[in-house]
Image (cartoon, rainbow, N blue to C red):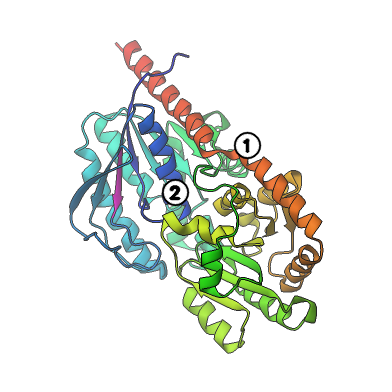
Amino acid sequence: MELVRLMKILFLSDNFVPEVNAPASRTFEHCKDWASAGHSVVVVTCVPNFPAGRIFNGYRNWPWQKELIEGIKVIRVWSYITSNSGFVRRTLDYLSFMITGFLAGVFVRRPDIIIGTSPQFFVVCGAWLISAVKRKPFVFELRDLWPESIKAVGAIRDGLTLRFLESVELFLYKRARRIVSVTHSFKDALSARGVSPDKISVVTNGVDLSQFGERPKDRDLLGQLRLSEKFIVGYIGTHGMAHGLTTILEAAKVASERDELKNVFFLFVGDGAERQNLLEMAERMQLSNVLLLRTVPKCDIAKYWSILDVAVIHLKDHPLFRTVLPSKLFESMGMGIPVLLGLAGEAADIVLRERIGAVFRPGSAVDLVDQIQYYLSDPVALETCRKYALRAALKYDRSSLAAKMLRILSDVVVTDRENKQLRP
């Protein structure tokens, strides 16, 4: 099928740069490449505030603001702002953006296609409403099996609310012209629920190799943090309910009690609903081998990756999380940082297949420490993992993945135009 030369793409996402979480990074990097290819890209989003619920410097929570970022036309709308915690307040946040995002999207002239991205699907509701008003196709970018994921972390229980959310979820799957899933496991899960696999395409998360690439440790940062002589075990990302980061603190306690691991230091970088609990837990445990830093600007994040000897990626032990592919896995690859993965499923398959690290039992601090001790004692194994990680990253280059998704969007637009021409 012939591809559309140029399109006007309208993208709804409640996270966008300068926020640095996975949805913001993926959306920005894809849209930047599409704009560079000559397409008109409009992103409707809210004021940057994730995950602490504090508006970033230079922004105000106004009804309508416009800016141009790397060729992307960005429209920021008002939303109810809260920290990344509390089910009711977060739901108000999502609903408010669904309404204001929809209103802003309706005034975007002549889009060819509308995309709504999860994790939560109220954004996608807004995208579907815009597509219904404008009679243009919409694409559901599926980043998480929501609301199942909030059930998995205990934020919602079985009942009328969950059943209602699940019915909305299925409605959106059926109305989407195409579903772009970030994992093959999500595609399998949707197919098992009756969604046609023919309408589901997989475009995994990846890494921007222009930002995340092999580099020496940042000596200035090591000196600033007083970690120059340490073997650094790092977690960089959202400190959320699903991540089970207490396991890493427990590992720090175990490590502190082993003489051969006195040089190991645990570094956390990020924010989220569980950060305060982690700070209090670290203080109660009197951990002198742990430092918890807040989120750093996107332009600085690679410096923090560079000083890690190994990266920890962890999620709670729940069957749902075996279907996810954390974006930090690919950033680790790009930086050549060996991965210690506390997660089964598709992500574990990648780690083992690409030989970029090791897998430990989710929730097991002892297993994690044993893996740390292995790599600390075997520099050759550590260096081998680094080389394999850098090689594997080439398979997940974000630019290639953005081009793949662009071809999917073009196919949807061409099909939509052909179908309209056939109508009497």
Observer-nearest of 345 and 18: 18
Task: Give amino acid for label 2.
Answer: Ser
- Residue 340, picture quadrant: bottom right
Vertical position of residue 121 compared to residue 176: above or below: below
Q: Position of residue 226 (x, y in %)?
A: 56, 75
Horizontally, residue 98 falls left or right of residue 386, namely left
**Residue 157 is one of the magenta-drawn residues:** no
Q: Amino acid at mark 1?
A: Lys
Query: Mark 2, residues whose alpha carbon is within 10 Å: few (<14), some, or many (≥20)?
Result: many
Query: In this image, 54 relative to 150: left or right?
Result: left
**Residue 20 appearing in the image:** no
Say how many tags the image has. 2
Q: Please, is residue 220 above or below residue 418 in the view? A: below
Q: N-terminal of the two: label 1 or label 2?
A: 2
Q: CA distance from mark 1 to mark 2?
A: 18 Å
Image-quadrant location for residue 95: bottom left
Number of the label disc, if any, that sits on residue 247:
none
Residue occupying the point 77% across, 50% down? 384
Q: Residue at x 70, y 51 (%)?
A: 386
Q: Quadrant of residue 250?
A: bottom right
Query: Horizontal and vertical percent for residue 225?
Result: 53, 73
- At 38% from the left edge and 45% from the top edge, which residue is drawn? 124
Q: Mark 2 sits on what residue?
A: 25
Specify the segment rendered in magenta.
42-46
Classify 31 as above or below 412: below
Q: Nearer the viewer, residue 309 or 144?
A: 309
The image's mark for residue 395 is 1
* Residue 196 visible in the displayed image: yes
Q: Main secondary structure of the magenta part?
A: strand
